[in-house]
Amino acid sequence: MFERILLAVDGSEHALRAAKVARDLAGAVQAKELRIVIAYEPVPAYLGEPNLQHAIDARLSESQATLREAEAVIGELPTEIHEEFIEGQVADAIIKVATTRESDLIIMGSRGLGRLAGALLGSNSQKVVSEAPCPVLIVR
């Protein structure tokens, strides 16, 4: 049923809970693939050098730390695990990866690290739910 699961993480508490759910579900349904996606907003080009390069390096470092946190939660699975870093509007990037990789399910946290921490459902989660090419499991 869910052979190709996409897990979108951003380092938030909700995303780490989503990683636990992805781990458990991938193991239970014997998924063939679990794809961990870290999507991040583009660094504005107007920063200029050397600030632009510093910002890009910091973004990559943060993304790698987020990946390590998710991998620590997931642990060992008898499933192929792939990682992708993608720059762009977060919801659009997740949808694009899910479409391109023909994901059967997207798992993500209900709220991320965005500015509206008090919202019931984050704007990225809302957009993914409404536009995804497959079912979406939102974890609180």
Image (tube, rainbow, N blue to C red):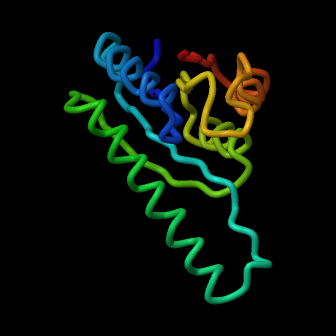
Position of 1 with respect to 99 (left or right) is left
Q: Residue at position x 72%, y 85% from top?
A: 48
Q: Position of residue 108 (x, y in %)?
A: 55, 26
Toward the bottom, the furthest residue is: 49
Q: Position of residue 35 (x, y in %)?
A: 44, 38
Q: Residue at x 57, y 33 (%)?
A: 102
Q: Is 87 on the left-hand or right-hand side of 85? A: right
Residue 9, image x, y percentages: 50, 37
Q: Work out whether residue 114 or residue 123 is closer to the camera in this orientation and state it.
A: 114
Q: How many marks?
A: 0
Dividing the picture into quadrants, the one containing residue 118 is top right
Residue drawn at 35 percent across, 28 percent down? 32
Left or right of residue 136, residue 76 in this image: left
**Foreground residue among 96 and 3:** 96
**Measured along the vertical axis of the image, is residue 18 above or below residue 98?**
above
Residue 42: image location, x then y, percent: 70, 62
Q: Residue at x 44, y 63 (%)?
A: 61
Q: Name the image quarter holding the C terminus.
A: top right
